[in-house]
Image: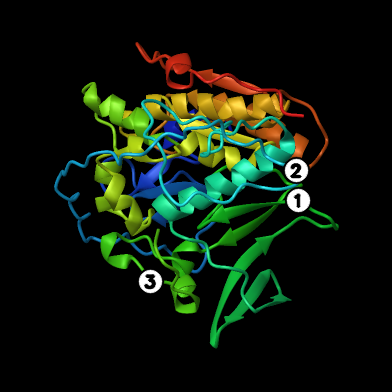
Amino acid sequence: MKTLATALLFAASAAAQAGPWAQCGGQGHTGATTCVSGHYCSVINAWYSQCLPGTAPGGPPPPPPTTPVPPPPPVTTASPPTTTPPTAPPPPVTPGTCPALPSGLGPANANLPNPFVFQNGAAVTTKADWACRQREISAQIQTYELGTLPGKPQSVTGSYSGNRLTINVSDQGRSISFAVTINKPSGTNVPAIIAYGAASIPVPAGVATITYNNDEVAQQQGGSSRGRGKFYDLSRPPAGSACWCIAEWQKQNGQNVQPALQIVGENVWLGPAFNTYTSNVRALPFDHHMLAGLVAPRALYVMENSDMEWLGWTATYGCMGAARKQWEALGALDNFGYSQVGGNSHCSFPAAKQGSELTAFINKFLLQSGGGTTSIFRTEKNHGSFNLNTWASWSVPTLT
């Protein structure tokens, strides 16, 4: 695995070139646009290109679109919905059953919503309850922010030739086909990392990579690309790492951070239903600490940049600090890692600071060889007056 020391040696002979895993292009990028020897500049999306090991497949990558990012919609204000509190204590959750999914937003939240309480007020006390709560959170995030995930298609088949796996999907008379590239070492039962566009982190020799062109399946080329891509050719469902509430607080305190109101005008990462709440994110019954918790207690390693104010350095730190409490409740802190370091541009991977952490997660959860520390929660940033215990003041249960 190449380190920053190696990158500095490269830079000594090619000062105008970007080092391994460094940013080399994208809208607004003013640094180097070529890479050191042995690496090529891969366009990940219109906003970010990265120096990856090897040579460019099929020639140089196309330049990012020159169409300017559309401006955010005008600021509007919205009053939080009024709700009537329950007049009686909520019923306990019956073991083996889940409460009905809520049909409304519920009460607004002053800080981060409590993941350990159902919207009907019942407490989450067991791991079975937690599975039900995850189901509820997932439904709400799909409804109010990300869009509804369609059901299982009628037919999925695949064929493998060379290093390409072609997937054929059919549903309700519509069909699509797309391919992924698989690079794997010899042997069987090899773990794999799925890469969106290209591998943007060092991948050890014993791990395969599955490179997936997400832009082919669902375009993300600005607001005008909504609804384009093979996913939408197959199914057109109804629409519906930082926490929105903390990002809004950062903005109110004068920091140059991207809040919900701005991001909906930049691209199509969020469903149209979310536009209703960009000026009133506290009305939502969830935030992104609960999005992360949808995979708990499985392993999650979050790498963040403490130097990029625009990426919401406090919003990501606070959000993942709150997310970590869900792994704590499940007795699985060894499965959660959050590392926020600086000294690198945008999304470039700082191998000298986070390489050993990434290796520890790969060794433990992919190669199952152990070694290294995976219970990680650290930052190089002074977050000033931000207090995680104020934003996530709820108690952490021990789920059995």
Distance from Cα at disc 3 to Cα at disc 2: 34 Å
Task: Pick whichever of labels 3 and 2 is earlier in the sequence.
Answer: 3
Disc 1, SS: loop
Q: Position of residue 18 (x, y in %)?
A: 41, 40
- Report which residue position mark 3 lands on: 228
Query: Eyeballing the image, is 367 above or below 43?
Result: above
- Report which residue position mark 2 lands on: 366
- Report which residue position mark 1 lands on: 191
Q: Are the residues tagged 3 and 1 within 8 Å (C-beta)?
A: no
The reply, left or right, for residue 341 in relation to residue 280 is right
| Amino acid at dot 2 | Leu
Q: Quadrant of the N terminus?
A: top right
| Amino acid at dot 1 | Pro
In this rendering, the count of numbered labels is 3
Which residue occupies 29% across, 25% down? 250
Front label number (3 vs 2): 3
